[in-house]
């Protein structure tokens, strides 16, 4: 459903993505795995139109996202959970969710569904987003993206800096969403964060995808991990 | 009275800075243009001062807003809202507008008749009914702007754009359109302030400098981008300016206002109600 064809992306003069190519199948959880600075976050930003590619195409159900203005991309049904959450922290929980609902004029049933995934947020609707704990903020960031009623969800290191119990809950919610038919691209740095949830893993190195493997294969041979990610990650 | 109009004009500047993070140095010239257009409209529209005033309330904000729209499209967007470049570009715009006004309208001050001349007779002194009207009208507009910002969907979009441009874009908010609208709204606000004040002050092609300076003072003291701060600071500065000007001298009033800015910048750089930059 999402087909990234050899895109090149730059920050000023520095090239971050080099002929980056990736195919996303409907209903799967695809994980981008790679070191700091490999280009994982930039790949997500390229999809969102925030870092427009200089060349190549990003086809989403046949539409070239690279040709759209950045604010039109989410309206096609792509929900983005940025790294570090990027909540509107001075606004309340419900105002943050309302921003998500406004993107595609989603109805109240979309809000109900998002809150059903994260029931904890229901009691916090009037609270200022910035005053919540890290895990709660992550839930809100994901709920906000779910309020778009997305076909594809882009998750950038959702478990970064959270305590283990919270990591497990976030991970479970990703799996729950898959059961509801949401397709997900998950960016992670650590292999152990990926193996329990992903269907396929794409290794990102120096701005390109060096290999894409099914997670079963990966579990079968740790050597692969060592080969693509290196020791110690 | 001065405080009320000052608050309107400072609000325009504060709104633009708050959302777009750029300083519009030509803000005072938008004010001057509003006043000039009020005079011109009053001259063109038959049917007495009231008809002219009502027409000016429509014509001036619309025309100045349109000019602001062009400025945003042709100037600010081209330089990508770079803060320093915007200051330089709007300084240029200041002189262009000022000199155009000079060659189009001439150098003499232009009086505009007040729409009504009713005097309210208090037991101890009389007070111009129009001046009171200006205060009431300004309060209405201030409350209206606050209501839009705090209670409506458009206000939410503006606050979100102010807070985090990139994330706002990722949620389908057309940031450029929001910028355009805010810049136009800021210019229209200052034009309304000008229409209100011109029956008291007369229109002149150099009149933009003073409100620009005062708006800056107000906005810095109140905290850049804080609407509440701007209004309160406008009240303090406007009233202090009035009182000191009457009992001592206008020069002393300016000195004290400028000194207050320096003190605020030293003691509390973010302004009385500002929040520190993220």
Image: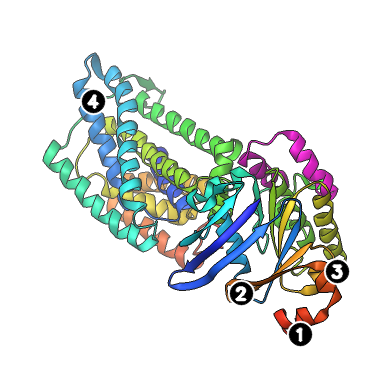
Q: Main secondary structure of the magenta part?
A: helix
| Residues in magenta, as a range | A93-121
Mark on residue A232?
1
Indicate left or right for B202 with B176 as reference. left
Both on one chain, marks 3 and 1?
yes
Q: Quadrant of residue A109?
A: top right
Give me the chain letter of mark 2.
A
Going from N to C along the chain, the mark reached first, 2 or 3, is 2
Mark toward the start of the polypeptide (1 vs 2): 2
Which sits in the foreground, A1 or B225?
A1
Q: Name the disc covering residue B256, or none.
A: none
Q: Report x, y in % for residue B130.
A: 35, 25
Residue A38, disc: 2
Contact between marks 2 and 4 (CB within 8 A): the answer is no
* Residue matched to label 4: B41
In this rendering, does residue B249 appear at all?
no
Closer to the camera in the image, B238 or B13 = B13
Q: Is residue B168 above or below residue A111?
A: below
Judge the density around disc 3: few (<14), some (14-19), many (≥20) Cα neighbours within 10 Å. few
Q: Could you tell me residue A218's position as x and y percent?
A: 81, 73
Q: Residue at x 75, y 40 (%)?
A: A111
Which chain letter matches label 1? A
Camera-side residue of B200 and B74:
B74
Q: Are marks 2 and 4 on the same chain?
A: no
The answer to whether residue A118 is above or below residue A40 is above
Residue named by callout 3: A164
Q: Nearer the viewer, mark 2 or mark 3?
A: 2
Secondary structure state at the residue bearing disc 4 = helix
Give a yes or no on whether discs 2 and 3 share a subunit.
Answer: yes
């Amino acid at each position: 459903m999402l087909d990234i064809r050899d895109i090149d992306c730059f920050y000023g003069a520095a090239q971050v993505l080099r002929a980056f190519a990736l195919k996303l199948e409907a209903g799967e959880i695809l994980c981008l795995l790679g070191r700091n600075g490999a280009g994982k976050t930039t790949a997500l930003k390229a999809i969102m139109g925030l870092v427009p590619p200089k060349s190549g195409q990003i086809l989403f159900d046949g539409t070239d996202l690279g040709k759209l203005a950045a604010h039109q991309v989410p309206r096609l049904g792509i929900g983005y959970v940025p790294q570090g959450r990027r909540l509107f922290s001075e606004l309340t929980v419900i105002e943050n969710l309302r921003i998500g609902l406004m993107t595609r004029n989603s109805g109240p049933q979309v809000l109900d569904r998002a809150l059903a995934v994260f029931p904890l947020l229901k009691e916090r609707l009037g609270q200022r987003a910035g005053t919540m704990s890290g895990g709660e903020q992550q839930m809100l960031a994901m709920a906000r993206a779910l309020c778009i009623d997305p076909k594809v969800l882009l998750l950038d290191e959702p478990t970064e800096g959270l305590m283990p119990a919270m990591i497990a809950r976030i991970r479970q919610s990703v799996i729950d969403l898959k059961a509801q038919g949401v397709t997900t691209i998950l960016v992670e740095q650590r292999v152990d964060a990926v193996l329990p949830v992903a269907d396929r893993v794409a290794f990102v190195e120096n701005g390109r995808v060096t290999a894409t493997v099914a997670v079963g294969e990966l579990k079968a041979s740790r050597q692969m991990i060592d080969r693509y990610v290196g020791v110690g990650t | 009275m001065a405080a009320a109009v000052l608050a309107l004009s400072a609000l325009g500047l504060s709104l633009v800075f708050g959302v777009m993070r750029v300083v519009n140095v030509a803000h005072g010239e938008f004010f001057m243009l509003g006043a000039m257009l009020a005079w011109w409209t009053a001259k063109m529209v038959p049917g007495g001062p009231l008809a002219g005033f009502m027409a000016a309330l429509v014509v001036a904000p619309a025309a100045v807003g349109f000019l602001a729209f062009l400025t945003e499209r042709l100037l600010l967007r081209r330089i990508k809202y770079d803060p320093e470049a915007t200051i330089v570009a709007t300084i240029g715009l200041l002189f262009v507008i000022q000199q155009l006004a000079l060659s189009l309208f001439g150098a003499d001050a232009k009086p505009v008749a007040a729409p009504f001349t009713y005097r309210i007779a208090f037991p101890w002194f009389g007070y111009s009914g129009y001046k009171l009207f200006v205060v009431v009208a300004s309060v209405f507009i201030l409350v209206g702007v606050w209501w839009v910002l705090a209670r409506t969907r458009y206000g939410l979009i503006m606050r979100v754009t102010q807070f985090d441009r990139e994330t706002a874009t990722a949620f389908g908010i057309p940031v450029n359109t929001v910028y355009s609208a805010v810049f136009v709204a800021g210019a229209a606000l200052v034009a309304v302030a000008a229409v209100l004040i011109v029956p008291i002050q007369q229109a002149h092609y150099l009149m933009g400098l003073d409100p620009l300076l005062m708006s800056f003072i107000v906005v810095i003291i109140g905290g850049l981008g804080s609407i509440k701060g701007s209004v309160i600071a406008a009240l303090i500065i406007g009233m202090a300016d009035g009182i000191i000007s009457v009992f001592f001298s206008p020069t002393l009033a300016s000195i004290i206002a400028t000194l207050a800015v320096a003190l605020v910048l030293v003691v509390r750089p973010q302004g009385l109600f500002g929040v520190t930059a993220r």
